[in-house]
Amino acid sequence: MAKRQDDPRELDWNVVVESAGEKFRGTRGDDHLVGTDFADTFNMRQGGNDRVNAGQGRDTIYVGANLAADDRINGGAAYDTLVLKGDYSSGVTLQSDTISRIEEMDLRGGFDYSITLAPDIRHDKINLVVDATEAQSLYIDGSAMNFSL
């Protein structure tokens, strides 16, 4: 019996799709959450001094208006996004271990953002795209960093 060309059993199904990961939700307390090897979503908008180790996938970590210097957000491998949405006009200082392995920071919602980079942040470890298209204003202070070009 001849096989039909449009028979799905005969098609090459060599397609790579990254599976949706887990959805994690923090609390108002201090949380420590560990992600998976897939594209996880972390809702850390509730506050607290949180620890996130996102894992291997293309992860998104939402912190709302609650990113603080004592948080520890590690995106892990792959392209990871940290999303801020809230009033940061009074400022937040990013220490060397506040965020790591985050490739993109999205500043959302028409708010003012003031971010200070602490002196212990290594200039050779900064590889971050900041998307401030929705921000009302953005101020980044890296004057305390010690490096020369």
Image: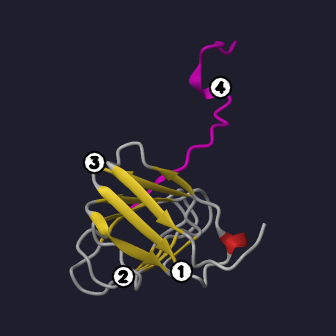
Q: Which residue is mark 1?
A: 118
Cα distance between the residues tagged 1 and 3: 25 Å
Q: Is the residue marked by circle 1 packed among few (<14), some (14-19), or many (20+) residues within 10 Å?
A: some
Q: Nearer the viewer, mark 1 or mark 2?
A: 1
Left or right: residue 15 versus residue 135 is right
Q: Amino acid at mark 1?
A: Ala
What range of the chain is rendered magenta?
1-22
- Work out which quarter of the rendered image holds the N terminus and state it: top right
In front: 93, or 105?
A: 93
Q: Nearer the viewer, mark 4 or mark 3?
A: 3
Q: Amino acid at mark 4?
A: Leu
Mark number, residue 11: 4
Cα distance between the residues tagged 4 and 1: 55 Å
Question: What residue is at 35 percent from the left and 49 percent from the top?
Answer: 135
Q: Which residue is mark 3?
A: 110
Instruction: State yes or no: discs 1 and 2 in contact (Cβ < 8 Å).
Output: no
Left or right: residue 56 versus residue 133 is right
| Colouring method of the image | secondary structure
Instruction: State yes or no: discs 1 and 3 in contact (Cβ < 8 Å).
Output: no
Judging from the image, what secondary structure is the residue with disc 4 in? loop
Q: Is the residue marked by circle 4 packed among few (<14), some (14-19), or many (20+) residues within 10 Å?
A: few
Mark number, residue 50: 2
Judging from the image, what secondary structure is the residue with disc 2 in? loop
- 146 to 82, vertically: above or below: below
Cα distance between the residues tagged 1 and 2: 19 Å
Question: What residue is at 36 percent from the left and 60 percent from the top?
Answer: 113
Question: What residue is at 76 percent from the left and 72 percent from the top?
Answer: 148
Q: Nearer the viewer, mark 4 or mark 1?
A: 1
Judging from the image, what secondary structure is the residue with disc 1 in? loop
Left or right: residue 76 versus residue 24 is right
Instruction: Name the spot of residue 26 as percent of width and height, x first.
Output: 28, 75
In front: 90, or 26?
A: 90
